[in-house]
Image (cartoon, helix red, strand yellow):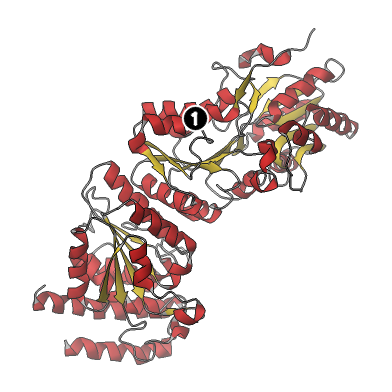
Amino acid sequence: MSDLDTLKLKKIAVDCRIDMLKALANAQSGHSAGPLGIIEFFVAMYFKILHHDPKNPLLPDRDRFILSAGHYCPAMYVAMAHSGYFPVQEFIKTLRQFETRFQGHPHNLALPGIETTSGPLGQGISQAVGMALAAKIDKKNHRVYCLTTDGESQEGQVWEALMWAGGKNLDNLTAYIDRNFIQIDGNTEDVLPLEPLADKYRAFNWHVIEVDGHNFQQITEATDEAKAVHRPTMIILHTIPGKDVKEIENDYTWHGRPPTHDELKKFLPELEKIKKSL
Amino acid sequence: MSFKLNPKMFLNQKVLEKPEMELHRLGFGEGLLEAGKKNEAVVGLCCDLTGSTKMDLFAKEFPERFIEVGIAEQNMIGIAAGLALEGKIPFASSYAVFNPGRSWDQIRVSVCYSKTNVKIIGAHAGISVGKDGATHQGLEDIASIRALPSITILAPADYDENKKATLASAKFIGPIYLRFGREVVPKITTSQTPFAIGKAKIFVEGEDVTVVACGPLVFEAIKAAQALYPKIKVEVINSPTIKPLDCDTIVKSAKKTGAVVTAEEAQIIGGLGGAVAECLSENYPVPIHRVGIKDTFGETGGPDNLMKKYGLKSDNIITAVKEVILMKK
């Protein structure tokens, strides 16, 4: 990836953070920390990795992207909006509002380009397995990508799906886990330890790559590496929850709350400053 | 005039004297095989119960379209939903106690709310599964699935109707829950008997009381009607679709008879009994008695002993008919 590419993506990422915080503050509801930390991943997906067409969301040979952790949807919505699926202003003004297309957790029938409904944790990864399997049955070459989170991995269904995909060498599936160590009740290792996480995936016959989840180059390179492996791949994204808003960074109490309007006024200049520095 | 079955239904006359028996679940196995031959989008998923759910017939013929999921019902429903989103018609099968028993949330979100074209198969439903005991007797499946929007529930009466229900499910666009039992049951219907999703059919015409039944209890209802004839003329309605219930047919019959008994091999709370009671109390209130599992778990035993002990035989329907008639104004 060229420096120019990276710069372009970094600029989009800041804009996404700004617009997402505005939407969350407008909604006065929703999750802040995880979505702020996963912005680079979604920007990489919708602006670099996915073969897709925002003007033709049902493009038959598109890559499928499945968000398993539905509460991360503000980050997905904002990246999709910036890539052209729907108007950014509609997202900012109507996220989580009455009769919006931008439901609190994503719904496949509410918006174009949303492959699956998610919210109850663990369901997306099984659906991703099903979609990857369908591609195998139909001998199609598109890939299936799925984002899970670390807290989500306490759900048994996640491991049922991983066991099946690993056991059957489902190599057209690449999953990502946002390893930010926070969940509603605290640090994941205090609530219910997940480590050694990479070893767990390896034991389930997954190829594992660990990357800095804020580094576009590492995310795209790992994704390319996965294409050449004859097993499913899990890319562990090491991220900072609340990334680029110092007050939110690494604070689990921000898992499930939006900024107030006053907090938004404080946070936006911080992000504008980053934008100018690029 | 002697007791007779509704001639328009082309039912098996032998059911009145010496019924022919056939495995209830075989209808599903053969139906799926036929559906698979007709449409290559049909795929089968199973959780380590391929032989006992009779999905083995399909699996042998179409190994590339059969998915052994292993013992993981939640994952099965998720995989099925993913396949459906890609245009497949997945039949996801296990025992009713596990599916929907263990996969309800996945059915709610990945199937019903998402409107994915998944067919959920609950085999070994009812108390007649017998010796495996209460843990394996699926009795709450109808009630738990009835509460979910946008799903259709089918409980066919016998082998032939199960086959038709399976074939109709493959053609139907939308989520379906299909439940049936393990055991042999009398062959009431024939290949000519009409079947349509959403329709109840009058198997015996009568004027004194209506019995609405589904699954293996349809036979018990016919037996009860035969025993009571001509003193009490019972109208027997087979209602293989529990949701959406064919309320029009049931209300029409209730207007004629003025009293209704329901009969099912499932919990009456939220089951067919619950559905019929809701339909009638909102549209045409008449006295109702419900034959079925009455808010209790089962136990280990032979199917016949259990059906007797838990009040699911024709004798129980006869008692209910007599009692409900006394309640008529």
**Secondary structure category for the residue under label 1:** helix
The answer for which chain carries disc 1 is B
The percent coordinates of residue B31 (x first, y second) are: 48, 27
Report whether residue A110 is seen: no
Residue depicted at 70% across the width and 37% down the height? B265
The percent coordinates of residue A257 (x first, y second) are: 46, 80
Task: State the count of labels.
Answer: 1
Residue A210 is left or right of residue A35, and the answer is: left
Q: Is residue A41 above or below residue B63?
A: below
Residue A140 is left or right of residue A260, and the answer is: left
Q: Is residue B61 above or below residue A154?
A: above
Q: Is residue B234 above or below residue A45?
A: above
Residue depicted at 66% across the width and 37% down the height? B129
Residue depicted at 17% across the width and 74% down the height? A217
The residue that label 1 is drawn on is B29
The percent coordinates of residue A51 (x first, y second) are: 20, 58
Quadrant (top left, top right, bottom left, bottom right) of the N terminus of chain A: bottom left
Disc 1 crowd rating (10 Å Cα; few below 14, some 14-19, many 20+) is: many
The percent coordinates of residue A104 (x first, y second) are: 45, 67
Residue B252 is left or right of residue B90, and the answer is: right
Report whether residue B83 is seen: yes
Q: Identify the amino acid type marked 1.
A: Gly
Residue B313 is left or right of residue A222, and the answer is: right
A93 or A203: nearer the eye?
A203
Quadrant (top left, top right, bottom left, bottom right) of the C terminus of chain A: bottom left
